[in-house]
Amino acid sequence: MFRALRKSSRTDILSTVCNFHSAQLQCVKEKTFSQALEDGPDLEDFITGTYKEYDGKLKLEKGDKTRLRLPPWLKTEIPIGKNFSRLKSQLRQLRLSTVCEEARCPNIGECWGGDKHGTATATIMLMGDTCTRGCRFCSVKTSRSPLPLDPEEPINTATAITDWGLNYVVLTSVDRDDLSDGGASHIAETVKEIKKRSNILVECLVPDFRGNENCVATIVNSNLDVFAHNIETVERLTPFVRDRRAEYRQSLKVLKAAKTCNAELITKSSIMLGLGESDEEIEQTMRDLREIGVDALTLGQYMQPTKRHLKVIEYVTPEKFKMWEKIGNELGFLYTASGPLVRSSYKAGEFFLTNILNKRRNKQAENQ
């Protein structure tokens, strides 16, 4: 997941991170450009390129010390779904911290309350709010020695989300290089507890575990439905964007190992755009992922979390994202989600994967 998150105010509770996906606010097609800017873009605008009239600067040239202004297609309002208030109240009662609210996610209402597809999703961050790594795109706080894991977290997490009426949950986490298994057994135990209590589909967006295939196998054998690990950026930029322990080839190794453990398991990865990568490098990264059997891919715009983090080099246009979606489909990905507000946990993608997984379940039931 793109972990460009705000710092949590607590260190002993879960951080709940909502899924980012393309804002679909209603606009009248006859609106002028200025009126559309006032209301924010809808999905049709992303596809047809209503915002081609925007003449602001989208890319920094070499040596440019300025910061790019946010383009109109990234300016949205927060919609409130019918389930929003209930879930917010439960979060407070459970003393769970949510970055969804702090970061003003534009899709918080739909993700928490379900959308036109009827699929309610949530993303839970396990193992605390402190990471042992310091990626330059991410604002999660770091420490060599984070607090010990909460042994009750797997049960508490499963108990909490079972009551939320979710169809699909994403379990992500900080990196915990201080632990012998990187927290793999803790994540796996959480999946097992969820599966004991419900039929919720579970995706795990996991660290690289320093390339340890035994840790990968622990996650795969937990009975999860989707195994996700983010490549984050192209190979050339990896040493500058990610922590030095997060290597491009190591991430490919992790994703390949998951497929080796279970060839039927859906694997997924994500790429941030706008960090100075070339088109050729993006396509090569997509090909590298496809060659090791990655099934689902998301591509989204990198957003600078604070002034201390990497600057945005380029704001990629919606038309360009559409092109990458087309290329992803041509390369044979099961699903390619590509758009400015798309994140590794992406509502439309989860709806798509839910349908595929449910069909597989039904087929297996018929064969038994």
Image (cartoon, helix red, strand yellow):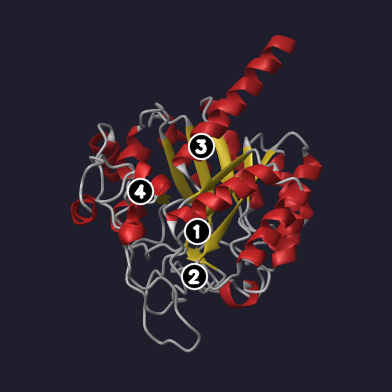
Q: Residue at x 50, y 59 (%)?
A: 2
The CA distance from mark 3 to mark 2 is 24 Å
Q: CA distance from mark 1 to mark 2?
A: 8 Å
Q: Is residue 147 visible?
A: yes
Residue 160 position by quadrant: top left
Residue 215, above or below 246: above
Mark in front: 4 vs 3:
3
The amino acid sitting under disc 4 is Leu
Q: Nearer the viewer, residue 154 or 170?
A: 170
Pointer 4 residue: 96
- Quarter of the image for the C terminus: give it: top right
Q: Percent from the top left, x then y, of residue 128?
A: 47, 58
**Whole-percent x and y of residue 193?**
56, 34
Q: Which residue is denoted by mark 1 in the rendering?
A: 2
Q: Amino acid at mark 1?
A: Phe
Q: Is residue 131 above or below residue 110?
A: below
Asked whether, in this view, residue 115 is left or right of residue 236, the answer is left
Q: Is residue 19 visible from the viewing direction of this image?
A: no
Where's residue 93, x and y in %? Answer: 28, 42
Q: CA distance from mark 1 to mark 3?
A: 16 Å
Element class at badge 4: loop
Which tag, 1 or 4, sits closer to the chain's start?
1
> Residue, x 22% and y 42% (percent of image)?
30
Marks 1 and 4 sit apart, C-alpha to C-alpha, by 20 Å
Mark 3–mark 2 CB contact (< 8 Å): no
* Label 1 with label 3: CB-CB less than 8 Å: no
Quickly name the residue at label 2. 137
Q: Nearer the viewer, residue 289 or 314?
A: 314
Residue that numbered label 3 is attached to: 350
